Image: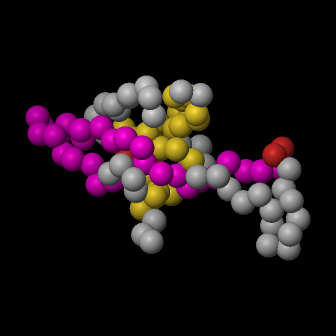
C-alpha cells in the first residue's frame, strides 16, 4: 500500500478476501450474481479506544483474517484498491488457521 493511512481510535482497515469463482458443482458464478465476501484481512489498526482517559488496545492486529457483518463499515479506495474501514466492534471474529 503506497498511500500510508493510519486509522484513528478503534477503527481498522480491512481488505476483502475474494469469494469463490464457481460453485462446488463447477458452475461459474457471474460477477453480477456474486455476493460480497464477509471475510477479509486486517491491513491496519488504530491505537485503541479511549475509556476514562485510558487507551484500551485493540484485540485484532494487522494480518489477522477476520469475519465481519454484511453491511459493516465504509468502503474506501486506497491506491485503486477497495478496502473497508470499520470499528473493531463490527468484526464478528478472528479466523484461526
Q: Quadrant of the N terminus?
A: top left
- Residue 19, horizontal then vertical, whole percent: 68, 56
Q: Is residue 92 visible?
A: no
Of residue 20 and residue 11, the one placed in the foreground of this image is 20
- Residue drawn at x 52%, y 38% is 84
Judge whether residue 64 is colored magenta. Answer: no
Q: Is residue 45 left or right of residue 25?
A: left
Q: Quadrant of residue 76?
A: top right
Q: Quadrant of residue 56?
A: top left
**Magenta segment boundaries in residue numbering:** 33-60
- Residue drawn at x 84%, y 56% is 29
- Residue 8, horizontal then vertical, whole percent: 31, 31
Describe the colour scheme in one phrase: secondary structure
- Residue drawn at x 21%, y 47% is 57
Depicted 20 relative to depicted 83: above or below = below
- Residue 87, horizontal then vertical, whole percent: 40, 41
Judge whether residue 59 is colored magenta. Answer: yes
Amino acid at each position: 500500500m503506497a498511500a500510508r493511512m493510519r486509522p484513528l481510535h478503534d477503527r481498522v482497515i480491512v481488505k476483502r478476501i475474494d469469494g469463490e469463482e464457481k460453485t462446488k458443482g463447477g458452475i461459474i458464478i457471474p460477477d453480477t450474481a456474486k455476493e460480497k465476501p464477509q471475510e477479509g484481512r486486517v491491513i491496519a489498526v488504530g491505537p485503541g479506544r479511549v475509556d476514562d482517559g485510558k487507551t484500551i488496545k485493540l484485540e485484532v492486529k494487522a494480518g489477522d483474517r477476520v469475519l465481519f457483518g454484511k453491511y459493516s463499515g465504509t468502503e474506501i479506495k486506497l491506491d485503486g484498491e477497495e478496502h473497508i474501514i470499520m470499528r473493531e466492534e463490527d468484526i464478528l471474529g478472528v479466523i484461526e488457521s
